Amino acid sequence: METDPSESEAGFAGLGLRAELLRALTNLGYEEPTPIQQGAIPPLIEGHDLVGQAATGTGKTAAFALPLLQGLKPAGRDAGPSALVLVPTRELAEQVSQAVHRYGRDLGVRVLPVYGGQPIGRQLQVLNRGVDVVVGTPGRVLDHIERETLRLGDIRTVVLDEADEMLDMGFAEDIEAILAETPESRQTVLFSATMPPRIDGIARRHLRNPTRITMGRKAVEPGELPLVRQSAYVVARAHRAAALGRILDVETPTAAIVFCRTREEVDQVTETLNGRGYRAEALHGGMSQDQRDRVMGRLRGGSTELLVATDVAARGLDVEQLTHVINFNVPVAPEAYVHRIGRVGRAGREGSAITLAEPREQRMLKAIERLTGQRITLEKLPTVTDLRARRLEVTRTALQASLETDDLERFRVVLDSLTDEFDVEDVALAAVKLLHEAAGGDRDEDEIPTPSLPPEGRRAAARDNRAPGGKVARLFFGIGRRAGVRPQDLVGAIAGEAGLHSRDIGAIQITDRFSLVEVPEPAADRVIAAMQRATIRGRRPTVRRERFAR
Ligand code: AMP
């Protein structure tokens, strides 16, 4: 925590980013670049092509979006977009597009997400008015190119984001076709969580002398890591704050640090925890040294039990009493995880490191396990029943401690006066109830839903379904060869909209007027529902179970 905040802000400035972007980052509460940003931003600003190995959660979006915005020239009225980002799914198209919008706010950037399932009319209107950055799924982008509603002649940068996922979804040909429409002089950037040979092939064919960035990690020496219990909970973003509260209620730490990515998040989490009855304080790089020292003093003195901090603010911090390190999200780099958990379990004391991960971030957990050589156990969130039981246990422990250590004589008059009229046991029960309530033990709680399976999990689940005996459903798509449908259009739509992995899609049969596609039976209804949103080759075909199954 001895870092001067101005020093950390120099982190992004030192990468050569323009003032408007630095301002946006400060407003978002980013304190310092992540490793992938540190490695990728300078060469990208210089105009090099780049291949980056990075998964979701590493900060890869900003790593390509910031340089892209840095070089943006206000487009003339008739000019087409100057940057194109291709992504595998509509969800990612929306996320990346929002990120570009937020980073580029002060530059007045116009960004448009395009993906199947969204009314094409609205996309056309916006395209006609002019956009600087298009973020789209390959199928829909190709649709626009074919309709001549998207001209790529002015493109200066193309980004292939999550390239491995795009290939898995059968988008290889579409990507090739799209790249062929862009100027050869373009800058090409490829990000992928994994680097199978097919990705290398694309890089070799379409990138010129690219800078390569792998998050080269050397394994951590066993002695470098404290022996702490490491666990993780997978929870959707919307329920993360509730999940944190529940975990704290069950874990009852003596003193804990909750790590967040940004200052904004630090402030939100602090507020939530205080609302839940914790004594939580924020610690971030935007605070003066004096303020930070005071917060630390209160944690050491025990008048604060939770510190909510960014990495920068917590650097070098050493608190003896610390029992828990909690990661409100997976840290952007596995190395940061190692630094964070180094705050507990010092000098042989026991400690816990708990990480909340969004479904998509599970890959990052694996990367951390590889780095540390230690397992992170995936835990189920405590249910409302678990929580109630735990709170009763806390009340019981408090009573037991009081029985063992307190001088209770002065309360005897109360007891005596009541036992004339009531049974002693009933009096005790009433006292327990009041204590329990006073400690917030009967606060109302809602169940936190288990997230739908993440991509990896889904794959595994669907594969199981295809195991011998696994049932397959055949779906009818009311669109066929006459409408120009190719297998990859069907795979792309199903993978993109229903989140099924291409590997789990079985036989595809395309006739003149309709197509039949096999999917795992347990996923069939989900696929049908998702297809209500999907457009395939510009149409929205009927999708249902095949009526005359053979
Ligand atoms: P990504 O890997 O691009 O999906 O980003 C993961 C998350 O990290 C997003 O929520 C970003 O807002 C956040 N993030 C990206 N870069 C930084 C940074 N330098 N500091 C703090 N948070 C960041």
Image: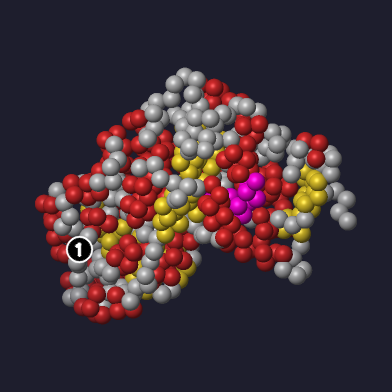
- How would you classify the magenta stretch by its main secondary structure? helix
**Quadrant showing the C terminus:** bottom right
Q: Position of residue 493 (x, y in %)?
A: 66, 45
Q: Residue at x 50, y 20 (%)?
A: 78
Name of the residue lying farthest toward the left: 290
In this picture, residue 508 sits left or right of residue 113: right
- Does residue 504 appear in this view? yes
In this picture, residue 255 sits left or right of residue 329: left
Q: Position of residue 539 (x, y in %)?
A: 71, 34
In this picture, residue 438 sits left or right of residue 356: left
Q: Nearer the viewer, residue 61 or 463?
A: 61
- Identify the image quadrant of residue 36: bottom left
- Does residue 421 appear in this view? no
Label 1 crowd bin: few (<14), some (14–19), many (20+), radius 10 Å: some
Q: Position of residue 255 (x, y in %)?
A: 25, 65
Q: Residue at x 42, y 55 (%)?
A: 212
Q: Report the span colored magenta.
A: 161-173
**Label 1: which residue?**
316
- Identify the image quadrant of residue 23: top left
Q: How many marks?
A: 1
Q: Which secondary structure, mark 1?
A: loop
Q: Position of residue 62 (x, y in %)?
A: 39, 45
- Identify the image quadrant of residue 103: top left
Q: Is residue 172 magenta?
A: yes
Q: Is residue 421 magenta?
A: no
Vertical order, 83 against 546 (above or below): above
The amino acid marked with disc number 1 is: Gly
Q: Residue at x 63, y 63 (%)?
A: 461
In this picture, residue 204 sits left or right of residue 341: right
Vertical order, 183 against 255 (above or below): above
Q: Residue at x 67, y 58 (%)?
A: 503
Give the colour scheme shown: secondary structure
